[in-house]
Structures are given as structure tokens and as C-alpha cells.
Amino acid sequence: MRAAESTGGTLKRIAVAVVAGLLLVGCSDTSGADHSDKPAKSSKATAVDQPETEAEATEPEPEPVTLEHIDCGGDGYYFSVEEAWPDKNDMCDAELSGTEMSPVETEAVETAYGDEADVDSLGTLYELCAQADPKSWDYLDQAGSKEQLAEVRGALILCPDHPQKKQLRKLVGGAEKRNKLADEGRVFGSGVFRVGDEIKAGTYYSTDVEGCYWERTDANGEAIDNNFVTAAKRVQVTINPGDYSFNSESCGEWRPVGT
């Protein structure tokens, strides 16, 4: 009898434990279900916002432009334009790093290139600054477009102590005057030009010519006057207002007498 009672009591305790366990599992599942959605929403917001925060935090700061070296074709590098000047180089390459230009560098490239200014353009100005051979600037005496002159002016802002600064300013001033005369039809080279429309009447000269031929013509294409010069230090011709055209070949650049 006691054995039966004992067995019955044991089964009762097991049943109670099973029921309690099921109730605990049910409560646990309900608690998980109640919070399952909220963490998912919070996690989703974090996943969207976090990359933006990291991108802002890792965005690199602009680095000042640094002149790494200048290569002028010699045995070694220069690390400033001043170091290159004593060797009087006529052609150099500059290597820069960084992206943020100084106020002087910005003024120089904007003077030289306007709105197209960038670090590569700044490198070109450093290359010009490193040149110190006087012959490097000979092109300004015979050519010198507005773009070329702007580039030289920008270089002089970047290196105002350049050893040829006086020569450069003189050449730039002469080229500007020549360009103005060309716009007025008072400076011209080889070719056929209509007098009064393309060029102005007046007295012109050219220097250091070889094999120079010039010709003044009337409206019928007949020569009024002409000449062939084998070689001369200076050639001069007067173009009259009544001339129809003026033609020259291999005479160089004609300029008004007195300029």
C-alpha cells in the first residue's frame, strides 16, 4: 500500500514539473515574440545610418601642395626652383603632391589659366620658374600669344625673385604692344593682305632677312613695286593708301617704323 502511494506521489510530482516547464517555455516564447520586431527596426536604422557616419569620419583632409622635386635632365633633382637657377636650365619637369594650393599658388594659376586652374597647371608654372637660361624666353620676342603672356605673368607671381624677372617683364610688355599692333593691322608676316581691310598703310620694316620677296599690287593684281632681298639686316617698305594689296614671303615680321 505504501509503495502504491509512493508511486502515485512520484507521478504527481513529475506531472506538476512537466506542466511548470511548459508554462515557462510558453512565457519565454511570448517574451521573445513581444520584442522580436523592435530590435529588428532599431537594427535596420543603425545599418542605414552607420555607413554615412563612418564615411564622414573617414573623409581625408586636403593636403597642402608640396614641390617634391624638379628634374631638369641633369644628374640629380632640385628641391626648390632657387636651387635650379644657378645651372641656367632651359627645360624642366616638376613633381608635386597634395591638392590644396596656397593663396599665392592659387593667384598664380588663376592669373595664368583662369577658371581652368588646377594642380597640374601649377606644376607647369613651377617648371617655368625653374628655367633660368635667358634663351628660354626668346619666343616672346617673336611670338607671345595672349595665353603665353598670361602664363609668364602667372609664373612671375609664383617666383617674383626669378633671375630674369626684368627681362621677362620687358619681353611681356613688348609682346603685349606687338599684339595690340597686330589687332590693329600694323604687325603682320608672310602672305597676301588687303590694304585698308587687313593691314594699314604706312612704312614698315623687317630685320635679319634672307631670301625675302615683297610686292605691292593694284586692284588688277599688277605689281606697283617689288623687290627681292638675298640677305639684309633690315628691309623697309612703304605701303600707300592707294595700294590694293601687299604680299611678302620669307621676310619675317613687318612692324611699323618707330616701334
Image (cartoon, rainbow, N blue to C red):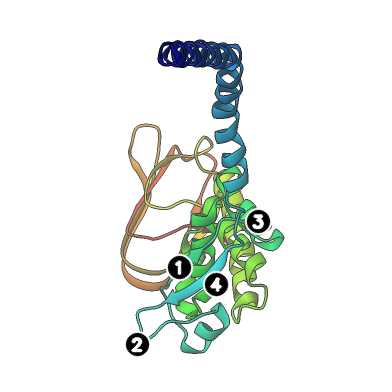
Q: Amino acid at mark 1?
A: Glu
- Quadrant in the picture for the N terminus: top left
Q: Earlier in the sequence, mark 4 or mark 3?
A: 3
Name above or below for residue 158 compared with residue 200: below
Residue assigned mark 4 = 129
Q: CA distance from mark 4 to mark 1?
A: 13 Å
Which residue sits furthest right? Answer: 103
Q: Position of residue 228 (x, y in %)?
A: 31, 61
Neighbourhood count class around disc 4 (C-alpha, 10 Å): few under 14, some 14–19, many 20 upward? many
Q: Secondary structure at mark 4?
A: helix
Q: Position of residue 121 (x, y in %)?
A: 51, 56
Q: Earlier in the sequence, mark 3 or mark 2?
A: 2
Neighbourhood count class around disc 1 (C-alpha, 10 Å): few under 14, some 14–19, many 20 upward? some
Q: CA distance from mark 1 to mark 3?
A: 17 Å
Q: Earlier in the sequence, mark 1 or mark 3?
A: 1
Residue assigned mark 1 = 95
Residue assigned mark 2 = 75
Q: Position of residue 188 (x, y in %)?
A: 47, 51
Q: Amino acid at mark 2?
A: Asp
Q: Amino acid at mark 3?
A: Thr
Q: Earlier in the sequence, mark 2 or mark 1?
A: 2
Residue assigned mark 3 = 106
